[in-house]
Amino acid sequence: MHGILNINKPAGKTSRDVVNIIQRLVRPAKTGHAGTLDPLATGVLVCPVGHGTKLIEFVQRMPKTYEACFLLGRQSETEDVEGAVQMLDNPPQPTRDEIDAVLPNYVGTIQQVPPAFSALKVAGKRAYDLARQGKEVELASREIEVHAIEVLAYDYPQLRVRIKCGSGTYVRSLGRDIARNLGTEAVMSELVRTAIGHFQIEDAIHPDDQLSQATLVSALQPTSLAVTQLAQVTVDQEAIVRLVQGKLLEVTAPDQAEQVAAMTESGDLVAVLVPGKEGGWRSIRNFANDYL
């Protein structure tokens, strides 16, 4: 059993909870997810199954779209309402024009300090474990890519925005930094991931009431959807045999392509290829055995 599930994660469940539901349905096939959502968050959780688990990194590269609500004039250690929220004493109330003026500072390639309550590791330990123990957590800033930020609604203290960004972006920390640029603080109260690449929330299924043994097969989408951002080459049966044998392929790929998806004539994914050191193309993900 191989494919990709587009799941609409409900609030209150961890991403691991959702994976566990799927695992019970697909075992002995493997499953996982391509991008954690906190329990507070809802929306698109892409869960590959079988061979799809070998393509998680390609899904993670896809741009993500979120709709988030921030409450200005308050703060918490977790940077969202899951922590103990504290009201600021007489905080400023930014105007819409002031918000619009600072948002361009957070579009493009920027530096972001991740939240202390995150799954990142510090000296081999999860940052959130150290933070819960009351220990000071210092995380280095890192480069992220934010493609666009759009204000959807503003009625102080609620600021609703749509954010399109790359992998590794912490939306609650983005809200934190925007608020500080406005001379205040903010906590995230809602977060919905509406898309990962072409995986849209409108097409996502709910794990509790729409996913079962009866619906599983029809819900699985092809593994080829994980590599749509790669250039594609079509391979014949002879090439498939060479891939099974671990041999290099001669393919016509676009100039400067670092990876290509090798597809059957009917559009099924056979392998992901990279240039070999001695010419030709070698596989880094190889599913050719399925096509003999």
Image (tube, helix red, strand yellow):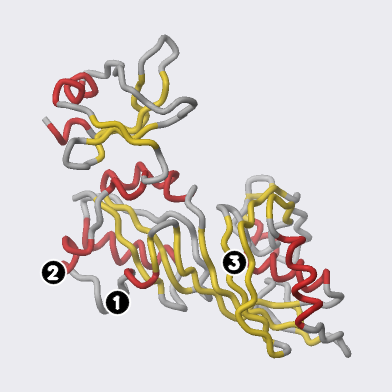
What percent of the width, then of the height, locates residue 167?
Answer: 55, 52
What percent of the width, then of the height, locates residue 185?
Answer: 79, 76
Q: CA distance from mark 3 to mark 2?
A: 36 Å
Q: CA distance from mark 1 to mark 3?
A: 28 Å
What percent of the width, then of the height, locates residue 215?
Answer: 17, 68
**Mark 3 belongs to which amino acid?**
Ile
Circle number at residue 208: 1
What percent of the width, then of the height, locates residue 278?
Answer: 42, 9
**Dot 3 corresponds to which residue?**
163
For the residue pair 231 and 67, the one nearer the viewer reads as: 231
Q: In which quarter of the view is residue 83 placed? A: bottom right
Q: Is residue 82 visible from the viewing direction of this image?
A: no
Q: Residues within 10 Å of mark 3 (few under 14, many from 20)?
A: many
In contact (CB < 8 Å): disc 3 and disc 2:
no
Viewer-side label of 3, 2: 3
**Mark 2 belongs to which amino acid?**
Ala
